[in-house]
Image: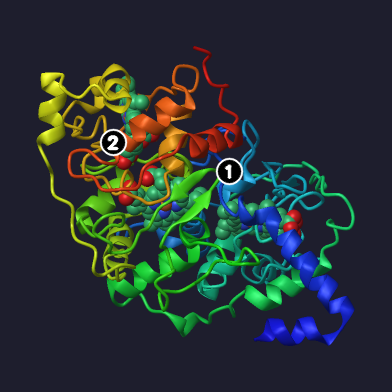
């Protein structure tokens, strides 16, 4: 309701609202770690991996300041600060990563402790204002590409540890920030402050959530540092996340990000995590794969740079919390495997273009049973990825291919080739429609028009001429 009153106030406010909406478009598609087609993969920052576990005997163990820095390093990984603040081939946290938007490019900033070009002159309060309130030291509002609407949930004690790490655990790098390429009037920042007042939640206090039980620890990590909802929650009219907490079933029910569907993480049995056990979820976040699926797109980077470095207690807290999320559709029936298609493929009796395209291009890895090879080539049968209503991820992966993350627990990153120069839009539509209706899968057909759109959006090769 705040919005209505504001809009009525004056024509000026109306324009401001319109600008706020327009500027919000900047981060709509990009409120996330850039990955995939547009930007080359974010390199692993050269800061050494660290796991903070009680009882670990390190030189830091006795020095409270050193311990705080170590804790901050761990939290920075859980929050994946490097994903956006480290450019490809750039120095860790020196910024400069281009984030494309429909109205121009914005760049992440230098958050190393360099006094002139970084945040070396920031006090703890300045740092807190940027990270949790979305307000830069000079008072202007940050683009919500910086996920401060999630970080608002980070407790002051953890902000203090992050600050300690960025001030004394990170190498200062002298590298000037790049101005955005956004033309005036879209470049004006004051509409962003209106957006912030409308949509940013209040920041939390230290007592706001506890680590006493794993579920509230998991909620804290998911809503706050992990900023999972920046990708996994659908966006509203002003491109704000439709929900920032689990009071609403929109929360983590799936959003499209950089032409991938960051899918439903709720308890839905067909397209959510209803059939995943807690162990399945932790295996995925730690190793990037499990018996149901393998990470690709933006999630591949999240696993590689962030979740694989989280300790087992935190990962199981995240998993336990995700398992509490009620399904969007509680009446949906679980899918059951059906042998019919596997038999028809083996007998060669299905001569449809979808079936033939599958045999020619996909069956070597995913097999005629659709079951693939465990932990190597993911199953397509009964997969929640395959059964998501929105086929964006599927079209994207078939056109451009994908590569699993390489993780400490699962170093081999198997890849799937792209088929953009081999399959026409109709072939891709047919093979995906076939996959989505075989082996017990039940998802809507994919059309050639949907494929053509994704082909254009992801910059894939033009259709082959036949
Ligand atoms: C999804 C991408 C993303 C992530 C993740 C991210 N940031 Fe940012 N951050 C940005 C962008 C983009 C800007 C610049 C926004 C602007 O110019 O308005 C920014 C700005 C900032 C600023 C303001 C810098 C200044 O010059 O005033 C600070 C401080 C900051 N981030 C710290 C962090 C920390 C600490 C983390 C991890 C806890 C983090 N960021 C995670 C994208 C991100
Ligand atoms: C940068 C955007 C982004 C962020 C941030 C992000 N995800 Fe994802 N996630 C995706 C995308 C895209 C997919 C779909 C590709 C895939 O399945 O790997 C995905 C898939 C997943 C899956 C696999 C679901 C399935 O059924 O296959 C899980 C589990 C998951 N994410 C959990 C999380 C958690 C937990 C967080 C926060 C700690 C998180 N994600 C943060 C983009 C993101
Ligand atoms: C060379 C082996 C190979 C071939 C051929 C192949 N794939 Fe894949 N496929 C993979 C691998 C490996 C992954 C996991 C990629 C990742 O996680 O980054 C994958 C992932 C997928 C996924 C996502 C599943 C999930 O839950 O993570 C779909 C859908 C898919 N493939 C469909 C197809 C289709 C359709 C074809 C034929 C047009 C095909 N694949 C051909 C190896 C292959």
Q: Where is residue 443 in the image (x, y as percent from the top left)?
A: 31, 48
Q: Mark 1 highlights which residue? A: 34
Relative horizontal placement of residue 267, taking residue 188 as reference (left or right): left
Front in this rendered view, residue 187 or 312: 187
Relative horizontal placement of residue 453, taking residue 333 as reference (left or right): right
Instruction: Assign a secondary structure to mark 2.
Output: helix
Q: Residue at point 60% right, 33% down?
A: 456
Q: Position of residue 77 (x, y in %)?
A: 48, 52
Relative horizontal placement of residue 3, taking residue 236 as reference (left or right): right
Q: Do the residues labelled 2 and 1 touch (CB within 8 Å)?
A: no
User: Visible in this render: residue 77?
Assistant: no
Q: Where is residue 27 in the image (x, y as percent from the top left)?
A: 66, 55
Q: Mark 2 highlights which residue? A: 435
**Which quadrant holds the N terminus?**
bottom right
Q: Residue at point 16% right, 33% down?
A: 341
Q: Tell me, what colour scheme is on the image?
A: rainbow
Q: Does the residue labelled 1 lie within 8 Å of ligand 1?
A: yes
Residue 163 tag number: none
Q: Does the residue labelled 2 lie within 8 Å of ligand 3?
A: yes
Instruction: Assign a secondary structure to mark 1.
Output: loop
């Amino acid at each position: 309701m705040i919005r209505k009153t504001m809009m009525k106030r004056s024509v000026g406010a109306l324009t401001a609202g319109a600008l706020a909406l327009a500027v919000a478009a900047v981060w709509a598609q990009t409120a996330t770690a850039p990955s995939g087609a547009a930007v080359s993969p974010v390199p692993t920052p050269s800061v050494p991996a660290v796991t903070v576990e009680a009882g670990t005997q390190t030189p830091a163990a006795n020095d409270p300041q050193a311990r705080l820095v170590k804790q901050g390093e761990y939290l920075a990984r859980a929050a994946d600060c490097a994903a956006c603040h480290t450019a490809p081939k750039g120095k860790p946290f020196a910024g400069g990563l281009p984030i494309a938007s429909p109205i121009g490019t914005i760049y992440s900033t230098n958050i190393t402790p360099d006094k002139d070009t970084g945040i070396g002159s920031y006090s703890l309060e300045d740092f807190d204002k940027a990270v949790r309130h979305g307000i830069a030291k000079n008072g202007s509002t940050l683009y919500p590409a910086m996920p401060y609407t999630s970080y608002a949930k980070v407790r002051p004690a953890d902000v203090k540890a992050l600050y300690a790490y960025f001030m004394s655990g990170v190498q200062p790098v002298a590298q000037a920030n790049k101005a955005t390429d956004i033309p005036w009037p879209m470049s004006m920042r004051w509409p962003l402050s209106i957006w912030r007042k409308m949509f940013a939640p209040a920041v939390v206090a230290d007592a706001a959530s506890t680590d006493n039980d794993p579920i509230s620890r998991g909620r804290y990590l998911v809503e706050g540092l992990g900023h999972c909802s920046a990708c996994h929650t659908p966006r509203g009219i002003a491109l704000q996340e439709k929900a920032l907490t689990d009071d609403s079933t929109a929360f983590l029910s799936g959003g499209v990000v950089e032409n991938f569907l960051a899918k439903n993480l709720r308890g839905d049995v067909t397209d959510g995590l209803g059939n995943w056990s807690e162990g399945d979820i932790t295996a995925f976040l730690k190793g990037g794969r499990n018996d149901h699926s393998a990470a690709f797109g933006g999630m591949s980077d999240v696993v590689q740079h962030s979740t694989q470095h989280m300790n087992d207690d935190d990962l199981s807290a995240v998993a336990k919390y995700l398992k509490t999320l009620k399904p969007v559709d509680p009446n949906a029936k679980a899918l059951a495997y059906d042998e019919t298609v596997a038999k028809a493929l083996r007998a060669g009796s299905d001569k449809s273009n979808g079936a033939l395209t599958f045999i020619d291009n996909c069956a070597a890895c995913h097999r005629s049973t659709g079951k693939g090879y465990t932990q190597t080539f993911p199953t397509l049968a009964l997969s929640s990825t395959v059964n998501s209503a929105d086929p964006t991820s599927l079209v994207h992966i078939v056109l451009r291919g994908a590569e699993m993350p390489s993780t400490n627990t699962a170093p081999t990153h198997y890849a799937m080739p792209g088929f953009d120069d081999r399959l026409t839009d109709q072939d891709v539509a047919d093979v995906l429609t076939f996959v989505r209706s075989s082996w017990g899968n039940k998802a809507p057909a994919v059309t050639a028009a949907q494929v053509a759109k994704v082909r254009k959006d992801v910059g894939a090769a033009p259709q082959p001429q036949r």
